[in-house]
Image: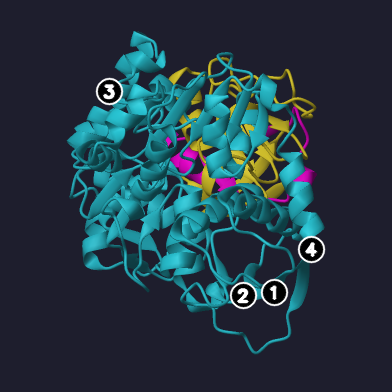
Amino acid sequence: MDLTSEEQDMLAGNQGRATQKAMEILVALGRIYGAERMTPVTSVQVAGVSYDNLGEAGLSFLSEMAEGGGRTRVLTTLNPAGMDLENWQALGISPEFAEGQERVINAFGRMGVITTCTCTPYLTGNVPHFGEHIAWAESSAVCYANSVIGARTNREGGPSALAAALTGRTPLYGYHLDIHRRAGVTVQVRGRVSSNDEYGALGKAIGQKLEAAENKPVTYIKGIDSASVDNLKSFCASLATYGGAALFHMEGITPEAVQMPELHDVIDIAQSDIDSALSSMNDAASEDVDFVSLGCPHLSIREIARIASLLKGKRVTKEFWITTARPTKQIADMMGYTAVIEASGAKFAADTCCVVAPIKDRFHVIATDSAKACYYAYSKNKFKTVLKPFDDVVAEALR
Amino acid sequence: MMWRGRVIYSGSVTGQAIVTRMGISFFGGVDPDTGIVVERGHELEGQSIAGKILVFPTGKGSTVGSYTLYRLKANGKAPLAIVNRECETITAVGCIIAEIPCVDHIPVQQVSSGMQLRIAVDGEEAVVDTQP
């Protein structure tokens, strides 16, 4: 790889042990993927934050990087943690877990990371513009940044994203290059999607066809008339979870969706494909739901306002977690939504979510509007799942 | 036998090979406390990779797997080295942060479990050969 003198300096260890380790990671990735050089990045999103996934060893790596002088050079934010950093006791988190999680957050803080723990950094101040080179982990946010915003990132893991943060660079390959951003297959959607659960089902239907294709081409999606930001974040999460996709183009909606001249293969998605994806994520009855969760990906303030209007003056009958970024919750506090929601008995779980919190064995059947949440509820926690439109999920908590 | 490959993380070691034709997912697939493969139905299920030269085609699974390699190293249960046909991000990053020698572009189907292997680094190239 062609390294600048500054980059060679980092690699030689002249800027500290942590920076050197970071550059070693980036150079190795660059060599594996045939990058000719590094590119500067302006924004980083780091994954690998939940103590549940990191354990003591992961924590000791982060501490080592902090002690080794690692400091962020660009705006860097975090993925969800394993708990609400302020209100963990009310959510049934053990003090031992909380202590480990706090040490993880402190290690990131010492490196200058902005410790907002969210999978929707693009809703809370870490917002790249079109064409900007960034290094993001968190598969749903990667898909959103590449596709909906038109920024450029590969699917980073925790350590490689941290390495980008500590050096301000990432190897130039993959989705940073025009050639890898072109669509390789057209997806013609012939069914109707309007709610988050339906967008999630569409993501699963397309994602599974991509998995079967193996080479995972970038998709050019036709047949969607309109989609809200909330719909798109649900769709991105599902397409990334079920199809490993980092980028799609959606005609009339995403900025790089210009029809490609080459002949494409076409994947047809019929109404029956969407319906069968929906039913595959409904393997339990409403009566059996013992856990209700909204906020995968983290809720927008518009969605929280909607929950407040649905819960006003009512009492929930089940454990109901509302997961969002702390800055978004602070807007909810300011607007009085938090008070209305908490008066109903529902609980805010900021900084975390039902995918990364240690909730195995605590519940059996989850109700959600998120296809991604269904995947992890089943694979990580062995829950059965009930997937419904947003308003109907709130109704599940009330019945 | 001797093969030339690409250095992912540098280091010269000699040890016994443990070989699988299947991919390895370190997160969820290997117990970070014991080094034993726990993925259901895996060729190496129940066997320990600790202190061996682990030979497999390519990694798979969650990116958290990089941290699993680091945890194995911290617990003294890491493989001595890793040899791949094609190394991917999770294994590469794991080997770098855990400082486990790693080589790829090796025809792993020619290696069998129990062989004594020597890995020697020569610049960006590594030489893997079998010891009598």
Q: Secondary structure at mark 3?
A: helix
Task: Spot the cyan chain and give its letter.
Answer: A
Viewer-side label of 4, 3: 4
Tag 1 subunit: A
Q: Which residue is mark 1?
A: A186
Share a chain, discs 4 and 3?
A: yes
Amino acid type, residue under disc 1 in the picture: Thr
Q: Secondary structure at mark 4?
A: loop
Tag 2 subunit: A
Share a chain, discs 1 and 2?
A: yes
Tag 1 or tag 4, which sits nearer the N-term? 1
Residue A183 - label = 2
Tag 2 or tag 4, which sits nearer the N-term? 2
Amino acid type, residue under disc 4 in the picture: Ala
In x, y percent, where is residue A367? 60, 31
- Tell whether label 2 touches label 1 (CB within 8 Å): yes
In x, y percent, where is residue A325? 33, 40
Within 10 Å of disc 4 (Cα), the crowding (few <14, some 14-19, many 20+) is: some
**Residue A129 vertical position relative to residue A12 in the rendered view, above or below:** below
In x, y percent, where is residue A350? 34, 32
Residue A12 appears anywhere in the view: no
Residues in magenta? B92-117
Amino acid type, residue under disc 3 in the picture: Arg
